[in-house]
Image (cartoon, rainbow, N blue to C red):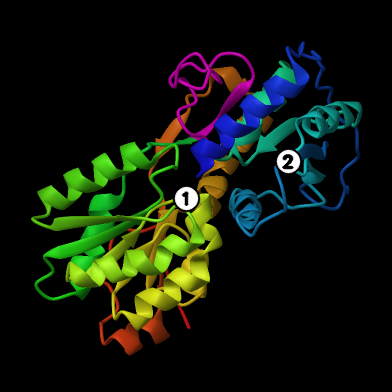
Amino acid sequence: MIRRQFIGFVGGAAASCGMLAPLALRAQGTGGTANATTAAPAKTRRIGIIVEGMRSAAYDGFLQGMDALGYISGRDYLIEWRFADGRFLRILESVSELAKLNIDLIFVGSPAIVYPVRQATRTIPIVMGYSVDPVGNGFVSSLAHPGGNITGVASTGEDISAKQFGLLAAMVPDLSRVGLLQNPDSSDAAADLKAAQAAAEAGGLHLVTVDARVARDIEPAFQALAKERVQALKVGSDRFLFSEQQRIADLALKAGLPSIFPERAFVEAGGLMSLSESLKDYYRHAATFVDKIFKGARAGDLAIEQLTLLDLVVNRRTAHALGVALPPQGDFAAYEVIG
């Protein structure tokens, strides 16, 4: 979903705004006197955080990362929050506002807004809390030597279908037939299907694919899964399917299908479990880049780190209703049981 958001956001912005010249805004240090009775540094740093939409709990991970490194909010650093509300020009305005505040660094949590922030300033250090293929998307020259004013954390881009099927197999005895509910009109559908087929084949599973483009397709898709006698269900990552999370979760439970989803919201709606990248842990790790820059490193000299950090969320009530045990702990950034 994040990759599609980036492509759509940048494409829409280019169409509406045309070529945008960099503002070439300069980052200047801030003054500020530390309390003489503490061991605080003489300078209180200012961090600008530009949020694409609404602030999510994932940003707490960044604050926790700063705390773990010994930084105290309000003493060692201050945060200036800016909310773009999905508007390209608002991002540029936010960078301009932050530069006037003598900001020391900009933290960006979404790949969709790395491009406009980079267009707005080539001097203020930018730390990416999460990114997808930063070289291919033109953010940096290379992972090892980013150059310019950008560094941070990137996803490895690893497909997690094999891990999802493994979790289902651990909960369903003699699992052999798995359904995949997808929207074939999604921009990533073909690649996701290919990866899921490869993972299913490697795991000795038969994959049954059903499509849902609009709401009226969902119930027939579950009827088709019943005819195919699937024993479990994987739901693809797609905006439309996400909008139908409650209905899909209800139908999966009604059909007695242990299910795995790409987003936590499905589990909150009653789905069995979700496996997704942990933005909170990516953001927590990104704080280490802020620390290095505060200590004098240049953003462009700090190699971008590629990580795979996954969150597993399980609905205990749904597991009980389906008569399945909770999955094993595994190697996850976080394992949470709700319900």
In front: label 1 or label 2 = 1
> Where 216 sits versus 136, above or below?
below
Residue 120 visible, this angle:
yes
> What crowding class fits label 1: few (fewer than 14 Cα within 10 Å), some (14-19), or many (20 or more)?
some
Secondary structure under tag 1 reads loop
Which amino acid type corresponds to the residue marked 2 in the rendered image?
Gly
Secondary structure under tag 2 reads loop
The mark found on residue 98 in the picture is none
The overriding secondary structure of the stretch rendered in magenta is loop
Residue 230 visible, this angle:
no
> What crowding class fits label 2: few (fewer than 14 Cα within 10 Å), some (14-19), or many (20 or more)?
some
Residue that mark 2 sits on: 86
| Residue at x 30% of width, y 78% of height | 326
- CA distance separating discs 1 and 2: 19 Å
| Residue at x 56% of width, y 30% of height | 7
Classify residue 12 by image quadrant: top right
Count of numbered marks:
2
| Residue at x 50% of width, y 13% of height | 141
Drawn side of residue 41 relative to residue 338, left or right: right
Work out whether residue 226 or residue 147 is closer to the camera in this orientation and state it.
226
Sooner in the amino-acid sequence: mark 1 or mark 2: 2
Classify residue 248 by image quadrant: bottom left
> Where 285 sits versus 337, above or below?
above
Which amino acid type corresponds to the residue marked 1 in the rendered image?
Asp
Q: Residue 179 at x, y = what percent? A: 25, 61
Residue that mark 1 sits on: 238
Q: Residue 280 at x, y = what percent? A: 55, 54
| Residue at x 12% of width, y 54% of height | 203
Q: Which residues are magenta?
A: 131-153
Work out whether residue 227 or residue 18 is closer to the camera in this orientation and state it.
227
Work out whether residue 239 or residue 229 is closer to the camera in this orientation and state it.
229
